[in-house]
């Protein structure tokens, strides 16, 4: 049995999801800033109860691995590790930006590249570039939007930016006509984390819990 609990805490939104053999069973998302430490465990317990499962049914825990909020990622990782140690089950990490891109594939054609954008400090965002097929064209990185070097290095094809970094992107990239934006708020979700985690689960691609830390991707690295 491959019942996987997924946890996403990389932004102000806190979400959990439950997948069985890669199929979504249920999910909960809470949009309450600075609430992860208080509400994460209760919404996990409620999701399991409402789905007629208990902790002992879980085969693995999946965690959004970053980048994103330093505090949020630490809280999610601590809860995930605690559950994994207590239940003696593996920990799976899925990149936050990869999961965001995966969730937006149906919104673009084959010619458009996906650019998830998460808020970072000052003029920076956390981002990557992926195509509709899920191929990563440029891995997760810190983009300095006020840098001409960054803007000139963008691919010469249609780009779709989405995420809480979009307002900042529009400020610096509006003149580039090949760039498009999703105006509505798009946040990372445990739903996409769970879909991608099942693929890793099948290949037994899990983390060493003793050494695992989130991918903070500080812009000062």
Image: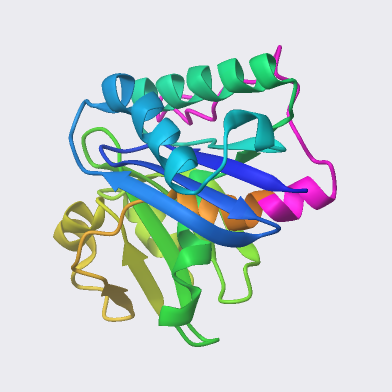
According to the image, what is the colour scheme of the structure?
Answer: rainbow
Q: Is residue 9 visible?
A: no
Which residue is at the far front? 52
Q: Is residue 94 above or below residue 196?
A: above
- Residues in magenta, as a range: 198-221
**What is the count of numbered marks?**
0
> Magenta segment: does it hold 217?
yes
Res. 220 image quadrant: top left
> Residue 165: horizontal and vertical position, in percent?
26, 51
Q: Quadrant of residue 204?
A: top right
Please tell me whether residue 74 is drawn above or below residue 217 in the rendered image: above
Residue at 47% across, 65% down = 103
Q: Magenta region, mostly helix, strand or loop?
A: loop
In front here: 108 or 176? 108
Rendering coords of residue 38 (x, y %): 27, 20
Q: Nearer the viewer, residue 5 or 130?
A: 5
- Compared across the picture, whether 37 is left or right of 158 comes to left
Which residue occupies 43% across, 34% down?
Answer: 44
**For residue 20, side relative to residue 193 (left or right):** right
Location of residue 152 (image quadrant): bottom left
Image side of residue 27 versus residue 82, left or right: left
Whether 122 is among the magenta residues is no
Residue found 70% across the figure and 53% down from its top: 198
Q: Is residue 102 visible?
A: yes
Furthest residue toward top: 210
Above or below residue 184? Residue 187 is above
Which residue occupies the foreground of this view, 174 or 214? 214
């Amino acid at each position: 049995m491959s019942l996987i609990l997924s946890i996403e805490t990389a932004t102000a939104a806190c979400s959990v999801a439950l997948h069985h053999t890669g199929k979504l069973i249920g999910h909960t998302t809470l949009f309450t800033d600075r609430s992860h430490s208080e509400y994460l465990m209760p919404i996990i317990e409620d999701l399991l109860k409402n789905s007629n499962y208990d902790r002992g049914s879980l085969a693995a825990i999946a965690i959004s691995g970053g980048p994103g909020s330093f505090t949020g990622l630490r809280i999610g990782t601590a809860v995930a590790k605690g559950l994994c140690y207590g239940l003696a089950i593996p920990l799976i990490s899925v990149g936050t930006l990869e999961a965001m891109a995966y969730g937006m594939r149906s919104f673009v054609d084959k010619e458009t590249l996906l650019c998830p954008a998460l808020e970072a400090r000052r003029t920076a965002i956390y981002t990557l570039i992926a195509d509709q097929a899920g191929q990563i064209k440029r891995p997760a990185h810190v983009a300095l939007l006020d840098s001409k070097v960054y803007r000139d290095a963008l691919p010469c094809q249609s780009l779709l930016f989405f995420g809480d970094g979009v307002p900042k992107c529009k400020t610096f990239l509006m003149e580039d006509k090949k760039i498009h934006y999703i105006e509505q708020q798009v946040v990372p979700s445990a739903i996409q984390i769970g879909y991608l985690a099942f693929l890793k689960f099948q290949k037994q691609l899990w983390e060493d819990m003793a050494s695992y830390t989130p991918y903070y991707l500080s812009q000062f690295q």
